[in-house]
Image: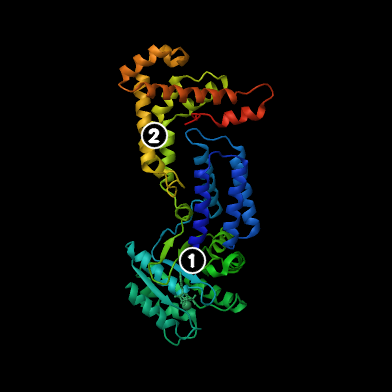
Amino acid sequence: MVLEKLGDSLKNTLSKIAKSLFVDEKLVNELIKDIQRALLQSDVNVKLVFDLTKEIKEKALKKDIPSGLTKKEYLINIVYESLVKFLGGEGYKIEIKKKPFKIMLVGLFGNGKTTTAGKLAKFFSKRGYKVALLQTDTWRPAAYDQLQQIAKTVNVPFYGTRKAKNPTDIYKEHESELNKHDIILVDTAGRDALSKDLIEELATLHKTVQADEKLLIIGADVGQAAEKQAQAFHDTCGVTGVIITKLDGTAKGGGALAACHVTDAPVKFIGVGEKPDAFEEFKPKNFVGRLLGMGDLEGLLEKAKDAMTEEDAKDMGKKFLKGDFTLIDLYEQMEAMKKMGPLTKVMDMIPGMGGVKIPKDMLKQQEGKLKIWKFIMDSCTKEELEDPSVMEASRVERISKGAGVSISNVRELLKQYKQSKKMMKMMKPGKGNKQMEQMMKKMQGKVPGM
Ligand code: GDP
Ligand code: MG
């Protein structure tokens, strides 16, 4: 599948973020370039690409990070959310609001109308609807046999009149039988281009059929030209949605998808192969998620939210700003992290991290360390937690015995604490140091050095 290429380049970009040490402007610029390259190669309109990446950049550099998310998670999330919005947001569903529900398929020659009629028939009959297929294509001699064959494959009744001349007559002839079904799928004839006579033919047929949905079928190989086609069909015969077919076989797929979203005719389904079940509802969230190879992003975000309330995070940020970050804060942060579950699991859920090979051993080791540190803190007095500088050798020994850990374990924790504190001091906002203050605000809720 050629779209995999787009997915692969976006995945590489995300793992670049995951692997990098800092999220800074340089990384964001690099990320923007990568995304632009990936989308342009997929034939997405240049202006759309630049609008999208401009939005990603602005968000990545300016907005405060929601509490409970690291900068990296936040950045990955921005890319994900922006791509989803770019392709249509929540997506559109066809609701079968009445019976019979009539769906007419329109489009130019060879885009996949007849094939898609079979796919829709299978899609809806699998969901328990009684579906009928009607052929009204009087232009292509083989159209009748083609749909009849497809109907047999998907096990749905077929209607049509061989050698009839007029699509509307065909419909009328079978109307009463068709009306006994829940869903009537009407296949129509195409042309090489959107001609006047095609529009007239569809308008006349529609007048009689009164279709609830008029779906335009466009092959992904049309690329960004899909926008013009979708808009023209929409303007002249009021299509209610688009189905992009052949997304399995062309580098231009991204172009077609993105182009249609900006028209008034949203993409409702996609075709990803010739077989009847190579077909799915178009849900931008799922589509982008798969493209990026994400793990359970939403699950991760939920967990992050649960683990740290916004208030906690704000307090933390204030403490950072004042510079009185204590071992207790470190302890609380660790507790919050623990609520998120084992590190190995958390890592799996971070989108982009799935592809990054962090040795499980290393994660396990880190987890083990956290456990030990918690034992140590449990053995500390309140005074020691609030001001670890009082911990001279005898206290360290007492704590190590109380916690059942080695002295070097305690020293390691103290070292970690000192490093965090040093880093914090370095970042402490001085007079007129607005930039630093901004940065600190962005770091709200983050444990430095961890
Ligand atoms: P129509 O003229 O619009 O009715 O188009 P057809 O349904 O006859 O399809 C034209 C060609 O496109 C056929 O060879 C189909 O097998 C092929 N086709 C349709 N949809 C898809 C798809 O999603 N993927 C691929 N690879 N081929 C498709
Ligand atoms: Mg056809």
* Position of residue 439 in the picture relative to residue 388 (left or right): right
Q: Quadrant of residue 135?
A: bottom left
Residue 305: x %, y % from top left: 44, 34
Tell me which label, 1 or 2, sits earlier in the chain. Answer: 1
Task: Name the residue type under label 2.
Answer: Gln
| Relative vertical location of residue 215 with respect to residue 415 in this rendering, above or below | below
Residue 57: x %, y % from top left: 61, 45
Q: Residue at x 53, y 72 (%)?
A: 107
| Relative vertical location of residue 253 with respect to residue 395 in this rendering, above or below | below
Label 2 Cα neighbours within 10 Å, binned few <14 / some 14-19 / many ≥20: some
Residue 286: x %, y % from top left: 44, 53
Q: Any mark on residue 366, and which? A: 2
Task: Name the residue type under label 1.
Answer: Leu
Q: Is residue 381 visible?
A: no
Q: CA distance from mark 1 to mark 2?
A: 43 Å
Q: Any mark on residue 247, and which? A: 1
Mark 1 touches mark 2? (CB < 8 Å): no
| Relative vertical location of residue 421 with respect to residue 365 in this rendering, above or below | above
Q: Is residue 72 visible?
A: yes
Label 1 Cα neighbours within 10 Å, binned few <14 / some 14-19 / many ≥20: many
Residue extending furthest bottom?
A: 163
Q: Quadrant of residue 62?
A: top right
Find out if the beta carbon at label 1 lies less than 8 Å from the nearest ligand 1 atom: yes
